[in-house]
Structures are given as C-alpha cells and as structure tokens.
Image: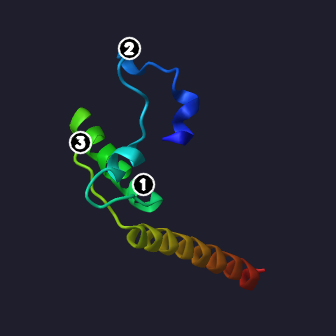
Amino acid sequence: MVWLSPFNSIVPCGIRDRQVGSIKGLLGDGEQGKVGDLRLIDVAHESLLKEFSEVFQLQIEKQTVSDSFKWVCEKALDSILRSFKKRHELAFVS
C-alpha cells in the first residue's frame, strides 16, 4: 500500500521479512473486496470488546446507539424537568 510507505523502515515485532500492514488492507483482501471505514470501525470495535472481555474475564452487554441515546435523552429530560419544577416552586413560594 502506497500510503503505508513512510512506515517501511519499521520492523514489526522484530520480524525482518514482514512489513507493516493495515487492518483495512487485510480485511480488503477477502472475498468482499474493499472494506468501508464504517465497517472497519465495526470490526475493530467487535474485536476490541471480544479481546477485552476475554482478558479481563468480563461479560460486556452491548447497547445500540439508539438505546444509549434514548437513555441519555431520558436522563437529560428528567434533569431539566426537575430543575424546572424546582424553579417554579421557588417562584410561587416567594
């Protein structure tokens, strides 16, 4: 890969007959052809979760972005409503 040429002088892990590669390049050599950046992020994320959970003997529960976003929105809305109620209680007491 041309864009990896600045890394040609690196000897990965002391193995002299190998070159630096990229995950994107390795995945792109498969049957599916080139891998898009979003797919690469998904593959890297899944691999990271798998390896992390195995090394630290954890079970990781995944949430979709929409689930996480919904949870954040609910918490933010809840906080806003509490603040709004508190301000109005003080306004009516004064």
The CA distance from mark 2 to mark 3 is 32 Å
Q: Residue at x 55, y 71 (%)?
A: 76
Q: Secondary structure at mark 2?
A: helix
Q: Is residue 47 left or right of residue 23?
A: left
Q: Can you identify the residue that label 1 sits on? A: 41
Q: Can you identify the residue that label 2 sits on? A: 14
Task: Decide which of tag 2 and tag 3 comes sooner along the chain.
Answer: 2
The CA distance from mark 3 to mark 1 is 22 Å
Q: Residue at x 39, y 43 (%)?
A: 23
Q: Can you identify the residue that label 3 sits on? A: 58
> Within 10 Å of the Cα at label 1, are there few (<14), some (14-19), or many (20+) other Cα atoms?
few
Vertical comparison of 68 with 12: above or below: below
The CA distance from mark 1 to mark 2 is 28 Å
Q: Secondary structure at mark 1?
A: helix
Vertical comparison of 28 with 92: above or below: above
Q: Which quarter of the figure is the C terminus placed in?
A: bottom right
